Image (spheres, coloured by chain):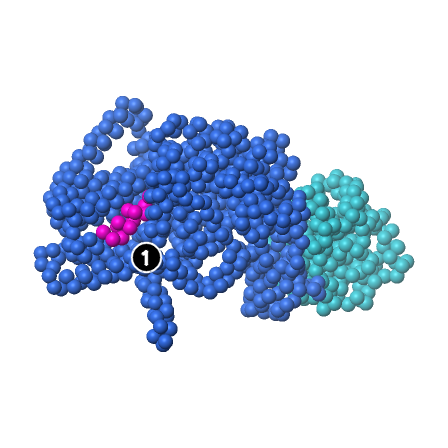
Chain colours: A blue, B cyan
Amino acid sequence: MSVDQRPKADEVADADSHSPQAHWRTVVHAITGWAIWQHPTARVVAVVFSALLMGLVISVPLDLQGQILFSLGSFAAALLLSKTPGRLSTLAMIVLSISASSRYIYWRFTDTIGFTHWMDAAFGYGLVLAELYAFAVLLIGYFQTAWPLQRRPVPMPADVSTWPSVDVFIPSYNEPLEVVRQTVFSAMSLDWPQDRLHVYVLDDGRRTEFREFCEELGVGYLIRDNNHHAKAGNINAALKVTHSDYIAIFDCDHIPTRSFLQVCMGWFFKDTNLVMLQTPHVFFSPDPFERNLDTFHRMPNEGELFYGIVQDGNDLWNASFFCGSCAIIRRKELLEVGGIAVETVTEDAHTALKLSRLGYNTAYLEVPQAAGLATESLSGHVGQRIRWARGMAQIARTDNPLFGKGLHFGQRLCYLNAMLHFFYGLPRLVFLTAPLAYLFFGAHVFQASALMITAYALPHLAHASVTNSRIQGRFRHSFWNEVYESVLAWYIMRPVLVAAINPKLGKFNVTAKGGVIEKAYFDWTIARPYVVLLLINLVGMAVGVWKLFSSAGDETTTLVINMVWTVYNIILLGASVAVASETRQIRGTPRVAASLPAVIRFENGRTLVCKTEDFSQHGLGLAVPPDVDIPMGSRLAVSLFRSDEEGVFPAIVTFSGKGRLGVKFDNLSLHQQAELASLTFARADAWIATWGTGQRDKPLRSLKSVIVIGLRGMGQLTATAFKSLKPLKSR
Amino acid sequence: MKVVAVVSAKGGVGKTTLTANLATALQHQGAPTVLVVDLDPQNALGLHFGADPGALAGVSRASLSGDSWGSVCQQSPSGVHVLPYGVVNEADRMAFERHLEANPDWLALQLQGLDLPPDALVFIDTPPGPSAYMQQALTAAQVVVVNLPDAASYAALALMQRLVHTYCTPRPDFAGTLHVLNQADGARQLSKDITRVMQDSLGDRLIGVIHEDQAVREALAYDQSVLEYDTHGQAADDLRKCAQVLAQRLGLPLAGAAR
């Protein structure tokens, strides 16, 4: 079911009870089991003592040698801890990381900003503020992710008559029917008492083909006479004409598994104050990052950290929030907050915030029970992130979680970080250009020696890296966060700042899905900011090299440090450029890799037992014995199974090679399409296999992969530039 | 020694084919000794093992003449021991059946007389519907009922139930009726519906669903078991799975799947 989020050391300890890891665990259990910890006074004393000690560690000034020795000791402790099992070690690493970073920031403020020149001050304060932002996000991030709740599904009561009624809402605006139909089929096959399951398509596009499709299937079709407030308004209009106790909401391209309701609803019985339960969004097609960088299912994607760790961490603080799809909300309380929030463009998170403010519980269940299409193009992906960023900034402005009633401290911090997170645009751009201030203008943004800077900054960065690597392990690889942020920074910076100034400005944009990228191309428009930044950094690098050989003098160390930083920035920007190189996407409907039992029945009555390699709503890839010869164009029937159930689907062979067979379904009736959906996309186990099962993070390996992609990006850029210059030359 | 009678209330359900293929599958999967006994005057079982359909020798003739079963036993190329019914004239057949009616434990005694090892498996093929042969089989063996996914077969379940109740239930060693659904067809709605009803009503007593497959008919014409004739086919796959479940239910150890 859900992923084992624990570090590798725990697996070692489980496997071998004589390992040092297992011994460590025994000792830790013994110490944490001491009765003294149960004593309130002892706890207070321990906290006060630790806080004083921490204050001392943060603020005591050391000379270069002392700082180096101290940092080495601290970092060695962190590396040792990273080899030990258990959450106590994780917490200890967090404490070490926080003290290293706090020490850095303290030193930064007390020792490095005595600027004497206005230019140094301008660049210097800019960088300090950006660092302060990163420090705040680091601290709140630790708070948020230190102890993921790892909630498990609660079984439903045996007495089916007590199960409540559920309305399934599938809002759609401009997505093609092709995309929506799978979701409808799967929603219809949800395992739930049929008299208490009502599926509705909420069609804001008011399209005839949608109405006819719904009528033919016998599912509800709801429209309204305006499009006010987009998806939120659409759902609110539907709330007025439907009546079930619970609402399950699926974006029209998120296909639920048939077990969705039975897996999720149990918690509402166990916790009667629970009003919203969210499950992860997983995607069976690669997002633009994964497609263009070829990392699909090999590297955790941009969203995985959020659904793998952050939401689960929020859950501990009763602050997991609604993400617009793949969630269940109780109607009564939803109506109590006035339906889905319409004041901001991230109506989902805002609705959850309102529910939390009224004292209701929210939950996150880390079991993938639905999957969807990722955005097809980078521009679409960026557009979606812009909307999230703008919406979160709007909430921060209009309904700031730090203030107002109803929330406890943990909830305030978790919501705050959800919003603060999207303000990374400007700070990231500052980091991407900071060393240039020195290389171009000779500005001294740090009023300290280069070696001191290294001795303080390096531990800060290294601790954060190893600690986050342990926490995030399977859901985010080191340095990739920087790549994701670098790509999006420029684009989300402006809308976030605009929304922070005037939350009313800006428009809702819907992300188009289900498209085809006919030809590989380089998206110059979207890449322009990184290309410019990359060129500036390259020039800065050239300037650095020139200075190094001409007039470095006594500032060689400073120069080298700035150049190393610039190289890192060049790599990040190169990787960003690589993302903009859109690779060809062949299939309009993506195929999902899955090995399912299948049987082929030929026209002559003979049969062949085989397995699927992948499925889509239009066809199957089948693995067949290599000696079987099946001519292209043959008609056959393919059976798919789910325990005792069998569905038979007529198909035509479109590909026949050694051991592989491609078939296209042949004129399936609506009934057959629904049956196909229940045996493929709606399988309960469909998405669990690929969730969080990737490699664990290894920071150095991860750095290497980012470097490789950064170089590739620069290669692609050069090649594209030459190609577009050629026609000019020949003219 | 495990003895399994393959029975049905209705004719044409594929009992003989199923008996032959299950026996062969179990032989392939490493059952130490597999013996099939044809108690059906059609004398068709031997055909599935490459026996000469015109050969006179068989259990009917041997029993009438007082010869031992061992003298008429043959071994098929796959290793299954086969006891055909044999060819007899009408008078002899009636005499044989009268003999069976007069001696209800004839089959049990004959099997004991074979002195088979404890891990031997014996299949008894029977004619459809109540008969002296079925009565003998039900008295001596565990029962596998073969059904088709049609209304008639479903309706006939009750008759089979009564017969089992009369002859088997009182026996202390009787482990409960097992069922196989033969010639299922996922493309036909009626077949799917009845399959579902049988799955629901029989639960784990349904030990296998064998799909309709042209290869089953072709295999007989080519003098092969369907397992050899079309090893990747659905029927072959279903039969292998069914054989495994049967072995497990009977507590029969398999030396390891040969294929």
In the displayed structure, A474 sits above or below A556; it is above
Residue plotted at (40% across, 63% down): A522
Quick one: SS at disc 1? helix
Residue A432's spot in the image, x, y percent? 27, 53
In the displayed structure, A320 sits above or below A492; it is above
Residue plotted at (27% across, 23% down): A41
B256 in the magenta segment = no
Residue A104's spot in the image, x, y percent? 20, 42
Residue plotted at (15% across, 43% down): A113
Question: Which amino acid type is shown beneath numbered disc 1?
Answer: Tyr
The crowd level at tag 1 (other Cα within 10 Å; few <14, some 14-19, many 20+) is many
- Furthest residue in direction left, as rendered: A554
In the picture of the structure, the residue carrying the numbered disc 1 is: A530
- Furthest residue in direction bottom, as rendered: A730
Q: How many marks?
A: 1
In magenta, the rendered stretch is A422-434
Q: Give the camera-side residue of A486 and A10.
A: A486
Residue B178 seen in this snapshot: no
